[in-house]
Amino acid sequence: MRLVRVRSSIESAREFLSLHDGPTAVFCCDDADSAIVLASLRDGVSREVGVWLSVSADYPAQIAARDARTLSVLFELRHVVIEGADQHAEIVRLLLSGEEVTFSNDVARLDHVVSRPVPQQPLTVWSYADSALTSPEATLVASGLERRGDLELTYFEDYSG
């Protein structure tokens, strides 16, 4: 499996739409909310995509899960990358399940939470740390960097250590 993080500014976000082939593109906006900017590109997105979200105290995992659900209604969202502690990604995974969640870790406590609607297609939720993407199913490591116009593309591929 391969993914490519497409890092953009809000001014050059439309260039993301020019990526028609290659690995699934995971959109990341450096100077605006990635979910909102990606949603604004909705009419031009014609392939499977992902979104890169930086979770923090100001943007908690619960809101990231809500944004992922919203984006999954707008287009074929298949991947969500959570930059921050893996514990944030764990919360997003649980909230996207559609099941009642009672869970606690160092970053959140959830008591009898149900988060719906469930995305129509399963989403892979990745955590990002130390140049690697990790999900329960796989680990992808950064394998290359490229610039295309104002976009920065970072490729991630299977790690078989």
Image (spheres, rainbow, N blue to C red):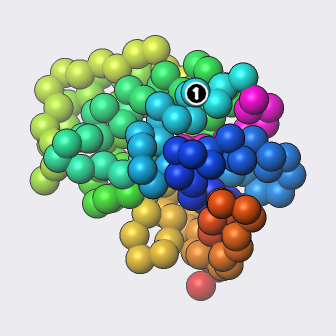
Quick check: 67 above or below 17? Answer: above
**Percent x, y for residue 41?**
64, 30
Magenta stretch holds residue 150: no
In the image, which residues are magenta?
44-52
- The residue that appears at 42% across and 29% down in the rendered structure is 67
Residue furthest toward the right?
A: 21
Tag 1: amino acid: Ser
Quick check: 105 above or below 37? Answer: below
Q: Quadrant of the N terminus?
A: bottom right
Give 100 or 30, whichever is nearer the viewer.
Answer: 30
Give 53 or 149, whichever is nearer the viewer.
Answer: 149
Quick check: 89 above or below 94? Answer: below
Question: Where, by quadrant of the figure, is residue 63 drawn?
Answer: top left
Element type where label 1 sits in the image = helix
**Percent x, y for residue 144?**
68, 78
Q: Quadrant of the C terminus?
A: bottom right
Q: What residue does disc 1 label?
A: 40
Give 57 or 88, whichever is nearer the viewer.
Answer: 57
- The residue that appears at 68% across and 41% down in the rendered structure is 14
Give 51 or 91, whichever is nearer the viewer.
Answer: 51
Residue 4 is at least partly visible in this image: yes
Residue furthest toward the bottom?
A: 161
**Percent x, y for residue 87?**
27, 54
- The residue that appears at 80% across and 32% down in the rendered structure is 46
Question: Where, by quadrant of the figure, is residue 91 drawn?
Answer: top left
- The residue that appears at 61% across and 21% down in the rendered structure is 74
Question: Where, by quadrant of the figure, is residue 38 drawn?
Answer: top right
